[in-house]
Amino acid sequence: KLKAINFGDCHWTKGFWAEKTQKAIDVMIPYMGDVLCGDIGHALNNFKIAAGLKEGEHKGMYWHDGDFYKFIEAKIYAYGLTKNESILNELDEYIEIIGKAQEPDGYLQTQIQLRSDADRYENRKYHEMYNTGHLLISACAHYRITGKRNFLDIAIKHAELLYTIFYPDTRHFQRFGFNQTQIMGLVELYRTIGDDKFLKLAQKFIDRRGTYEIKHDATTVGYPIGDMVQERTPLREATDPVGHAVLALYYYAGAADVYAETGEKALVDALNRLWESVTQRKMYVTGAVGQTHYGASVNRDMIEEGFIDDYMMPNLTAYNETCANLCNAMFSFRMLGIHGEAKYADIIELVMHNSALSGIGVEGTDYFYANPLRMLHGTRDYDAHADVTETPNREGYLSCFCCPPNLVRTISNLSGWAYSMADNGVYVNLYGANQLSSKMLDGSDIKLTQDTEYPWKGLVKLTIDACKEKAFDIALRIPGWSTSAEIRINGEKVEQQVKPGSYAVLNRCWKAGDEIVVDIPMEATFVEGHTRIEEVRNQLAIKRGPVVYCVETPDLPAETNVLDVYLSAENELITEHKADFLGGVTVVKSDVLVRKDNDNTDSMYRNIRAPKWEKHPLQFVPYYAWSNRGTAEMTVFLPVVW
Amino acid sequence: KLKAINFGDCHWTKGFWAEKTQKAIDVMIPYMGDVLCGDIGHALNNFKIAAGLKEGEHKGMYWHDGDFYKFIEAKIYAYGLTKNESILNELDEYIEIIGKAQEPDGYLQTQIQLRSDADRYENRKYHEMYNTGHLLISACAHYRITGKRNFLDIAIKHAELLYTIFYPDTRHFQRFGFNQTQIMGLVELYRTIGDDKFLKLAQKFIDRRGTYEIKHDATTVGYPIGDMVQERTPLREATDPVGHAVLALYYYAGAADVYAETGEKALVDALNRLWESVTQRKMYVTGAVGQTHYGASVNRDMIEEGFIDDYMMPNLTAYNETCANLCNAMFSFRMLGIHGEAKYADIIELVMHNSALSGIGVEGTDYFYANPLRMLHGTRDYDAHADVTETPNREGYLSCFCCPPNLVRTISNLSGWAYSMADNGVYVNLYGANQLSSKMLDGSDIKLTQDTEYPWKGLVKLTIDACKEKAFDIALRIPGWSTSAEIRINGEKVEQQVKPGSYAVLNRCWKAGDEIVVDIPMEATFVEGHTRIEEVRNQLAIKRGPVVYCVETPDLPAETNVLDVYLSAENELITEHKADFLGGVTVVKSDVLVRKDNDNTDSMYRNIRAPKWEKHPLQFVPYYAWSNRGTAEMTVFLPVVW
């Protein structure tokens, strides 16, 4: 229903996303490039060795190639935004090496090519499909933005091999498609070059799931099976998201891409159910998903880094991998395209301002893999097992490096999600000062300027710089969290109803100089969870617009345990903008009650009569900006004294 | 440090446990016998078929023999309390059949003898050790109480075979010992007949754990491995209870039995750590344990029906198998014997009055397998998978029948836990009207009468009916939950400090007619959980003495969702005894606040300003007595308005 604009048609001009994007171009991407092209990251090294340009052995996870492709993708967007030739040259250098690493038949997986203990398509845990997916996506982006075919040709050659091997129905290959970014990649390749065999192959990877017996075989051993990788239930019958959150959401996003091309009802019905289930029964207030590092599904399959029961939302142990949160936004962006409903854009906004951005420090050079809603000193064992990915602070490098480039490519690409085009209209999905210069679907020019200090202020001014003469729609997203938004056109209040959680569609003949003002009051409010969420009962969080706040040690009275802090519901929430604090944030201030009668015994239960509290003024900071001032305790939800 | 009294030395005379025990003798055991000896239970049938007395095939779980032995054990206690000859005759009939079912070499497992698809000691999932353990325990109890050897001889013959096969160190048999009641059984047999090879074998089953690589082999396939069955970490190095809660606690209880005989420090150090961890980081306020039906351990082993992370205590999905709760009491009774500290008896009291007793209906003929702390309409799928053992109401038969006989044998045996003997003293562990007629460790007679309406009233009167002339200790447990207990001897207040959670040891020359009064104020109080328990933050439970209360649908205003009920901390908790209600209970009454602004949307998070509440008077009932008035919603913890 909605079509994405071309990347580069929209540019952030100032404010929140302009600053984050500039930080991506200036710091995040160069820093990440230094790491990945050096000996610590060793990602480019792997390709150089496979290309015969260097001696050495493969280092990094099986999915390290894929993560390097995501970094390349980020850099492609940086080029698209800056047209900086040196970026283009660096990309060409990478691509040349990658091309040399590719086998004559198109195969390209350094983790297999350089390791003697792993064969091609021998076991799905080697993540070949994941690497393939990111290769295709990155190469298509490169072609679209630069017009150059060097990367695309590598991708096509690789995809041809994939088609040869995986399109026929064979038992050995039926369970591949695990960590299924190749579905998105194949659809993107189909869209880019028009060869429908790649669309068919994408669909094949969906159709095969759930058609075989769930027990370990040679292609699966060494990694959990069943619900963990969404192979127990055929997608069209699925009602609940299961298993690894990143695997699940890339899968659903890929299926949404397939639906967008095929229009198959059973597929979109399933995707609708799954999206509702993800966002209404398994999502944190920050838009984060993947409640646990380890657990089990209702079908009693072992689950890692993924979904568990509905409404089971632990705070401290929430896994919420940065990638999973980003995937939630990616899946939602595709659903937005399919249905054109504002609730999908609301999730993108929620994720990007909170649980995505929390994955990188304000300086742009350190990363969280997990994004819990609470952190307490001395509660986690960071050496409990080999795959602990939770850390007390952000780290400058993660040996499992999937999240950082995923986040940086999404930040760099976000201007491409700000608007969509409808049949005879332009949809404003995300707010932030920007300029749009694009074409409507009928080919007519459309130029807009958006002026706003969003998300810190809710006043948005849209000026039409150029447009066709005939009437068309301008659709403004009225966020689901807003209460009394108001629209004015050229100073005159629009009478039509402005409903939160929907697009306000304004149809008229527009002309250059027309000015639309959307005024969305940005009040700090208390938020409560569904009564079924046990972990937040009788607790509240603070949210202002799309931004979720938290309490953090540096803002607490000395020696205060964050668990002793109670909100006082009768106290006002005051906001103050601090331009020089944490990269520029609006903080929320309120008097809180600090519990004084907790005796810190280890006793699990105790009798209680009248608690003692002390009132303290406190500052709340945006959740995404926590942990930039040293090791801290933190919590999003706090118990409330009504 | 403390020695258990002989079974039969103490008899409940009236009140709470006298009534429950009489119900066991009159209803629970006969009803259960009808079921297990008939075609539905099919437990005796299995033995008859194995004995060649009947045609047919094995029915029931692999552990069905063991559950029948537990029923027999309950019946042995019933005989011990009543000396009813017809019970003795019925027991002899069972034993004769069991003896005929036994193979000439001592092997006795109907699930293997009658099934062609399973071999002797082929795979530990066949639960042979579990059945063996309960055979030995039951047979020893039979011999001790009746003096007859018919059952004991079967057990000895069986144990000899076990020793022959399992004492040598062989690779095939090293991982047996799973669901390890045989450890307790072997120590009990050693204590009964004095042959120390059975003690050595018991220790062997402990020592072998954690000494081999954790991967599936022919003896394990088909059932989870690793932490699930406590085989990843050697017991002496264990710091946290892991895995299946029943398996873990039977294992620890057995190890405590071994320690009691060997005195090995490393073993008791481990048991101390494990007991603290179970009761102070993983236990519900009802004494229940086993937080989840399915999940994973920190080592990322799949866990069923067991322990998960510290302080992760979901209410609705709490598994809390009746057996696990009972095992918590059994483990604690053994630790009480080792250390003589009141905290262990506190746990026994807590479990028995709450999460054990909740496993059976007030009528004595229906059972809960799982004992969650919250029940909500329409939230569980009771057909989600083959092994759902959670039910909305108690059931008259459970196809997995481990819990009912376990509970009934423990109720029938509880008078045996009421007192222990110390070097020169008698310890009063549990309160309840009873008469003790026993011998102190020096062989002198001791006769006491305990008069009390405990747990409904906290006044306990102990009268000495007979005792030796020399000074000795009478030690009274001052419950950990008490606040201002007071002791009077012959009307005179005892000056020595009375410390909650300890035994008050009264040493003097006692004489017949001496009267000790322990006055433990029984006030209904609010209880809060440790700040680390997310699922009960800013919520309170109500407890009075050892009894935990809950709110249940029949006591709520019509159409009220139990999740909308808030406690009001400023309202008084009033108690009222109702002799004809739920088998005779003291209820707690208080005004509560019913939330009126919950819009019952499915939205996972929502803005909140001032909630609306309506005040209602409400009655709280003992948790153990819930679900005796039709399908109900229920919760133990409720959010509080301070």
Image (tube, coloured by chain):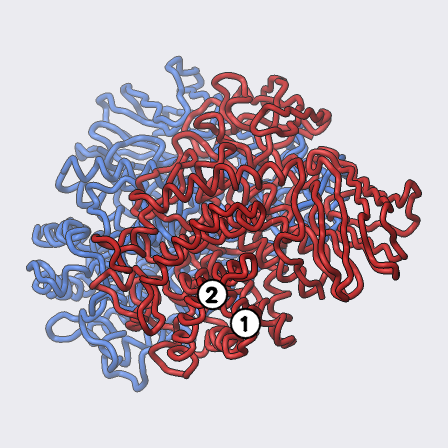
Chain colours: A blue, B red
Location of residue B314 with respect to B222 vertically, above or below: above
Q: Amino acid at mark 2?
A: Leu
Q: Position of residue B269 (x, y in %)?
A: 64, 71
Q: Position of residue B81 (x, y in %)?
A: 58, 47
Residues packed near mark 1 inside 10 Å, few (<14), some (14 to 19) or many (20 plus): few
Location of residue A515 with respect to A602 vertically, above or below: above
* Subunit that carries the residue with mark 1: B
If the image is split into quadrants, where does the C terminus of chain B sit?
top right
Distance CA(mark 1)–CA(mark 2) = 9 Å
Q: Give the number of the disc on residue B193.
A: 1
Give the quarter of the image for residue A616.
top right
Q: Say what secondary structure mark 1 lies in.
A: helix
If the image is split into quadrants, where does the N terminus of chain B sit?
bottom right
Badge 2 is on which residue? B152
Q: Could one spot residue A89 in this view of the protein? A: no
Q: Residue at x 30, y 76 (%)?
A: A46
- In this view, the residue in front, A635 or A449, is A635
Q: Could one spot residue B162 in this view of the protein? A: yes
- Do badges 1 and 2 share one subunit? yes
Q: Residue at x 53, y 59 (%)?
A: B141
Mark 1 vs 2: CB contact within 8 A: yes
Q: Earlier in the sequence, mark 1 or mark 2?
A: 2
Location of residue A284 with respect to B326 vertically, above or below: above
Q: Amino acid at mark 1?
A: Ile
* Subunit that carries the residue with mark 2: B
